[in-house]
């Protein structure tokens, strides 16, 4: 075994923990989002494709944005803009809703991070 | 039509490629715990050829092994073959780089063990890249990456040890 062998093998072994952390570390990243309008499922969209969605609700059109495995409200015809202030959702079980417009979004993945959420 | 005559080198490559194909097919009978994970014992032949006969001979043997092995197993041009070819090309590039660097700069000289680890990592990376780029472009595939790479490191070290033992006996 030469010194270079030792370095290569050590490097390979040292690389593994980084790979585990990078691929598994952020745990339960959601894979898709369920969009509900008026309590009924309107669409299920994958989070790995960047896109903008316009969802017609009770008051008007809410705009959702999907980017880098995350989803958020960017505009909604409501007054409080609670939904927009919820920001990005990425982890499975995370949830945002625009109650006046009757639109809710939640992220679904293999392992839910939360069983229930209280406000 | 001029007759094709095989040189000594041609015959040697054919023999070694036949040996690699045999190992490849014998190994394909082993059950695999998950797709993409395989001991890769045929690479032992590639490594031994590299160290005894040089990079060109090793590339010939490895590529002939991929083509002839897939024809015999009935996987020619199937995804399995594509993955195998991508992995082999990547590992040949890594072997070329590692071996070439060692010749230019003796302090960075790798023995068969380091070359084997390098080749195994490159093989898996090439295969994974093709699987992600072409067959399953879904981020969920990355959940497999650490497991696949762990297997690559383990089998790389094992193939390296086997190749080392084989080279030692061939030196008599």
Image (spheres, coloured by chain):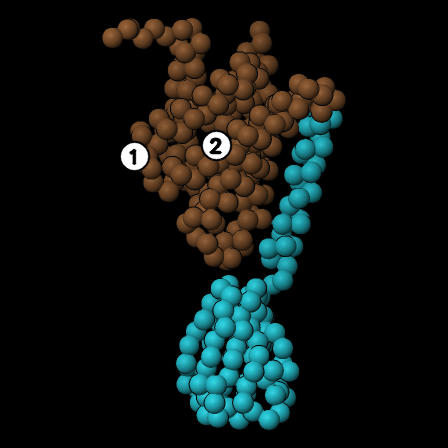
Q: Position of residue B110 (x, y in %)?
A: 66, 24
- Towards the viewer: A74 or A69: A74
The part of the image, by quadrant, that contains residue A37 is bottom left
Identify the mark nearer the N-term, 2 or 1. 1
Q: Is residue A37 above or below residue B11?
A: below
Camera-nearest label, 2 or 1: 2
Q: Chain of mark 1?
A: B
**Label 2: which residue?**
B88
Q: Which residue is mark 1?
A: B74
Q: Quadrant of the N terminus of chain B?
A: top left
Q: Position of residue A62 (x, y in %)?
A: 51, 84
The circle on residue B138 is: none
Q: Which chain is cyan?
A: A
Q: Secondary structure at mark 1?
A: loop
To which quarter of the image does residue A77 belong? bottom right
Residue located 60% across and 57% down the image? A24
Q: Quadrant of residue A16?
A: top right
Residue A2 appears in view: no
| Residue that appears at 67% across and 34% down | A9
Q: Residues within 10 Å of mark 2 (few under 14, many from 20)?
A: many
Q: Colour of chain B?
A: brown
């Amino acid at each position: 075994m030469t010194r270079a062998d030792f370095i290569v093998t050590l490097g390979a072994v040292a690389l593994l923990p980084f790979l585990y952390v990078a691929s598994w570390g952020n745990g339960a990243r959601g894979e898709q989002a369920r969009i509900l309008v008026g309590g009924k499922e309107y669409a299920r969209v994958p989070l790995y494709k960047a896109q903008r969605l316009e969802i017609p609700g009770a008051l008007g059109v809410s705009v959702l944005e999907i980017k880098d495995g995350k989803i958020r409200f960017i505009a909604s015809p409501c007054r409080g803009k609670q939904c927009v202030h919820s920001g990005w959702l990425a982890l499975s079980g995370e949830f945002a809703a625009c109650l006046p417009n009757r639109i809710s979004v939640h992220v679904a993945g293999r392992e839910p991070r939360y069983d229930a959420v209280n406000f | 039509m001029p007759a094709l005559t095989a040189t000594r080198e041609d015959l040697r490559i054919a023999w070694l490629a036949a040996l690699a194909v045999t190992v490849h097919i014998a190994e394909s009978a082993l059950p695999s715990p998950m797709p993409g994970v395989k001991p890769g014992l045929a690479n032992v032949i590639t490594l031994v050829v590299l160290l005894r006969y040089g990079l060109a001979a090793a590339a010939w043997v490895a590529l002939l092994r991929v083509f002839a092995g897939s024809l015999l197993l009935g996987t020619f041009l199937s995804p399995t073959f594509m993955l195998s070819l991508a992995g082999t090309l990547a590992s040949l590039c890594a072997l070329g780089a590692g071996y070439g660097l060692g010749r230019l700069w003796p302090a960075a000289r790798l023995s068969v063990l380091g070359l084997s680890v390098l080749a195994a990592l490159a093989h898996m990376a090439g295969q994974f890249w093709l699987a992600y780029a072409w067959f399953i472009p879904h981020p969920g595939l990355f959940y497999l990456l650490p497991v696949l790479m762990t297997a690559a490191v383990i089998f790389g070290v094992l193939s390296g040890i086997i190749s080392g033992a084989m080279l030692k006996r061939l030196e008599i």
